[in-house]
Amino acid sequence: MLFPLESAIRADAKTVAESGDYDIVIVGSGISGAIIAKQAAEAGKRVLILEAGTGANVTLAGYDNLLTTFYSAASKDNQSPFPLNANAAIPRSPQLRKLQAGETDSSNYIVQSGPYVSDTVYTRIFGGTTMHWEAKTPRLLRSDFKTHTLFGQGLDWPLSFEEVEEDYRLAEREIGVSANVEDQQYLGQTFPDDYVFPMRGLPLSYLDQQVNKGIEGTTVELYDKTYPLKVRPYPQGRNGIPNPAYDGGKGYRPIGAVNTHQVEEGGRCQGNTNCVPLCPVQARYHSGKSLAKAFAVSGERGERLVELLPQAVASKVNIDPDSGKVRSLEVKVYKDPASPAHETITVKGKVFVLAAGAIETARLMLASGLRSTSGLVGRNLMDHAYLLNWALMPEICGTMRGTSSTGGIVDLRDGPFREKQAAFAIDIHNDGWGWATGAPTSDLLELVDDRNLYGADLRRGMVDQVSRQLLLAFMIEVMPVESNRISVDPQYTDALGNMRPILSFTVPEYTMKGAAYGRQFARTVFARLGARDHTHYDPSDYGYVAYEGQGYAIRGGNHLAGTHIMGTTKTNSVVDKNQRSWDHENLYLVGGGSMPTIGTANVTLTLAAMCFRSGRDILKSLH
Amino acid sequence: MDSSIKTLDELKEFLYRAMQLEHATIPPYLTALYSIKPGVNQDATQVLRVIVVEEMLHLTIAANILNAIGGKPDLVRPDFVARYPAALPDGETDFKVGIQAFGREALATFLKIERPAQRPDHLVGKDLIYRKTPPDITALASHPRHEDLHFYSIGEFYSAIAEGIKYLEAEAHEAGTTIFTGDRSRQITSEYYYSGGGELFPVTDLKSAQAAIELIIEQGEGDGGGIYDDDDHELAHYYRFEELVKGRYYQKGDQPGHPTGPHLQVDWEGAYPIKENLKVGDILEGSELREAATAFNTRYGEFLQLLTRAYNGQPNLLLEAVPMMFEFRNMILELVRNPLPGHPGKNGSPTYEIPGGIKQPAVARQAEVNA
């Protein structure tokens, strides 16, 4: 809209192929790529961003088209706003099915080789997975950085919380996090004395408050230690009220969006419940907002410093055999999402950044034959395991009001019990049983088809049935396990002939122990609330896992991590603490893939913080 | 006649009229916006949406200036909402602003509203324009002391305010005081209102008051005839409407009247055929449509009541206004999508006849963001 910057930043394949003077070439326009691009542009560097998607949603009209697609889609899954594009295919959970023992399912983009079927997704369009993230932005706890030392579980980070703390603040500024410091001071989380978040915390929903009323002041016992229960607000990457005390009293100016025009920079959160998959008013942060700023930076001669080449799928990383440095990227540029016709170009630059998400970055490395000294590329794949528990509250509690999730029970994110079983954070879902049962569509079908209701009775029935729905989503810690991995195989390729990711995953015992305890915990909470438990796990569910005689349906959290893990040496990790590849000096593998553990925090804030660190290192290397 | 502002009370009355003027554009723009049928005119929808939001910003800025000098914004005074069609100055004559559907005619009016009008050489230095406005017509941007005397343009009206502020502040300064005696806590800041088309800053002194008036003028008419505002960042309203008429976007470096950016599509038939300047009295008594029109007017009156309270020391009430704006969309759609009995081919419309004596709006809960 209002004449977009878009045409000024959009590069064409021919110019890109002939241009040899990019300082940095970034694969992926998600939050990792966006942060590094913005930092680099502000330092006067020339940046090219390669994006596999069409880039149509860089404009407001394009963004609105995604919303239209979502509104008209029959299936409201978390990928439904995004048009089909076989050249940059994305995983979608409704296409999954249960695997037989030893079976491999290659009918979808991600090849599922089992034994567990993961419904984890990510988004290959402009803005990456921030186009559909839920925007919860908790930090990792201090202990999450050293779980091996403290609990004998997982891996220690090569960095301490203290070394990351300042970058957390940069990430909170970039995203424009809404939270109150006093709400986040639990389990040893501390903040500098004068720190406030960019925006004030969003209030707890009525449902959160009702749940809190039933549990506040009660406790649970776990391995002889007592944990108090209460509902605490989550920090969130969506626009609330800017805090005038931010930045030593300078205040905070809310984030810009896909377009430079201010009205289109994202409104204040209006409580639309469809934050996932897509906020209708761009109140929720997405990386298009950071990129809009990066695209606006001009060089000394007034030229744009950041260019975007959309419909460009990186297919191979070319290494100079003598120096081990990346020489170039091979990129397939397609003309039309409906056709596999493409041209292959070679892109040169000084530094290369793979910021395509934990699965695609590992896939590209493996497809390029780059297996690293440690042999860990693609291994240690992590994603939070979600266990859903749902019940009907005794009274109407306004379910469906507010954003997807505003608060949760988070006091079991840490404790000595982590020596034995996984920690978890519990999200209270304001959108009812949707994730578990397909509500409210399933309720409507039941009321009309089975109970023959219509008119006022139907309206009343919907209110009765939906506005008491409580869904507790247990986000359970998953530790790195080398056999949980992404690999490639020439027999599985996509429309462009690129090898597709093959996912092999087992939910670790440590996590299942946490899940089993979580199920008991949910029963306790429901009992205290007087809520009727409706939880049911079907053995035919694709995520069904049997553990100690009980069955559980595990869902993926889309918090992908671990595939190019960070460590202290080239033999125990793929990247160093700046996310630079140990084996290829001018190559950075950034994003969740570098994280050695994910604790019980959604990964985006942490990976964003890490990208500020990498950005500085890249700029240093370019001097 | 000397049209200049000489007393603080006069300045307050001028600023009240400025708020009335800023508000007067909202019903026509809002109605045109919601008259657009779903799925068409994406560009026009965005242009209108952006401009409505900016007009609300201007209304709030005018309230800030009035508060800064110790005035009391009052959006529930009986004459605050214009009777449509209302008269706006257009050089030596005036023109009528009405409530109508999006289309060529509406756009022609909108262009007139936002057009930068400058006196031709032979009229420079001359006085106000004499116009006899019929008593049932709201004459916007008229002179408070002389209802028949009108400013040449909206720009001239605001210049008079800017001059008045400067004059009165200089006078106060000589007497060792200031006109900016308003309670600072009554200022609406970006904490309560942002991404609404510009930075909202507190008005506390001459400098900030002048900056506030400049922002209103530039967003509307552009900076000294240029198509962009002073940051070279935002296109003035006039040129955004012109883009729709010309079917083409402006881009940097373009001359006024000659956009050279990408083409855009306008579907001139893509709006509900609402009856122009409808009055509740024209709608069949006892009909659902009449009930809906009355309900809308009542709710709109409550909205103005809420804004009045927000502008009088309770800025957090602005947060309550957001869900009310959603109600307006739904209520207006109910009106514009349904046929008007007795007027074949015409649909209903909001009438903006705001009843007096509106009670406190039904907002019981504490102000909070709907999280």
Image (tube, coloured by chain):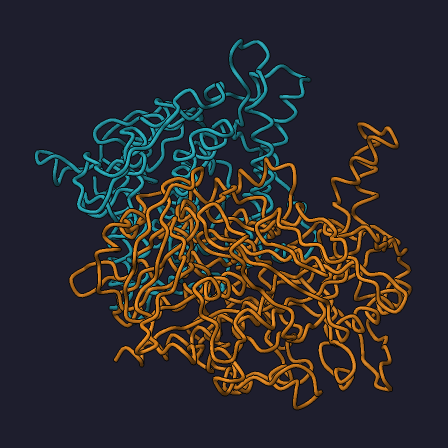
Chain colours: A orange, B cyan
State whether residue A279 appears in this view: yes
Q: Residue A165 placed where, x, y %?
A: 51, 82
At horizontal 38% and vertical 41% (from top left) the residue drawn is A341
**Foreground residue, B182 or A538?**
A538
At horizontal 22% and vertical 36% (from top left) the residue drawn is B259
Q: How many numbered discs, if any? A: 0
Q: Residue A93 placed where, x, y %?
A: 65, 50
Quadrant holding the N terminus of chain A: top left
* Residue A216 sits above or below residue A103 on the image: below
Q: Residue B314 placed where, x, y %?
A: 56, 58
Quadrant holding the C terminus of chain A: bottom left
**Most extreme residue toward the front, as rendered?**
A491
Q: Is residue B115 left or right of residue B74?
A: left
* Residue A430 sits above or below residue B136 on the image: below
**Foreground residue, A116 or A2?**
A116
**Most extreme residue toward the left, as rendered?**
B122
**Foreground residue, A424 or B167?**
A424
Q: Is residue B189 left or right of residue A151?
A: left
**Most extreme residue toward the bottom, as rendered?**
A149
State whether residue A398 appears in this view: no
Q: Residue A398 placed where, x, y %?
A: 76, 51
